[in-house]
Image (spheres, rainbow, N blue to C red):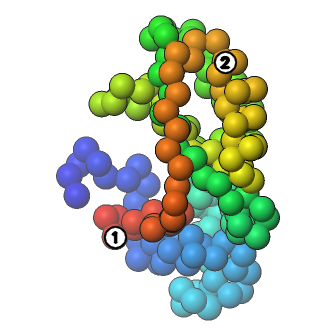
Amino acid sequence: MTASNKPLVALDRIDRQILDHLQKDGGLSNQELASKVGLSPSPCSRRVKALEDAGIILRRVTLLDRKRLGLALTVVLQIGMDRHTPERFQAFEEKIASYPEVQECYLITGQQADYLLKVVVPDMDHYQAFLLEKITRIEGVSGVHSSFVMRRVVDNTELPLGYL
């Protein structure tokens, strides 16, 4: 690892193990986590708190099964903007962040699009309504290209800790 991409906080083997286990199961109790990493509960709790305070652990979430909840359609959208100004981008980003259907939004380069979004909805009818009633009504959107996910080949939330 070069000096330019070193983590801002020094992590030892135990810290990396804690992060690895919490990425796999954020619902582990402190007792269970301590047992898995070979610590007693108090030092384990202090380490987790230090990782939270350092901003490495941002939050703990519960992952839900989209299909079992009736959210069977995942769409990847490429969105082009009419003007490339900070104000236009800020307005778009604020609006898009308010839509619960949007799971991810990236400002990108190297494509004809300016933004790449991942959207989850129940079906094509709901996607059409989302597209026509929300996306195309955002000021500055000049083009939308939709791609529909047929199958999730890799769907992972865990970061690769082997680089640390």
Residue 12 position, x and y percent, is: 41, 71
Residue depicted at 29% across the width and 48% down the height: 5
Nearest to N terminus: mark 2 or mark 1: 2
Residue depicted at 34% across the width and 70% down the height: 162
Placement of the N terminus among the 4 image quadrants:
bottom left
Disc on res. 162: 1
The extreme right residue here reads 69
Displayed quadrant of residue 69: bottom right
Residue 34 position, x and y percent, is: 63, 85
Tell me the mark number nearer the camera, choosing from 2 and 1: 2
Question: Disc 2 marks which residue?
Answer: 138
Q: Residues within 10 Å of mark 1 (few under 14, many from 20)?
A: few
Q: CA distance from mark 2 to mark 1?
A: 41 Å
Amino acid at pointer 1: Gly
Q: Could one spot residue 133 in this view of the protein? A: yes
Amino acid at pointer 2: Ile
Disc on res. 70: none
Q: Residues within 10 Å of mark 2 (few under 14, many from 20)?
A: some
121 to the left or right of 118: right
Residue 138 position, x and y percent, is: 66, 18
Q: Is residue 104 above or below residue 50?
A: above
Displayed quadrant of residue 132: top right
Displayed quadrant of residue 45: bottom right
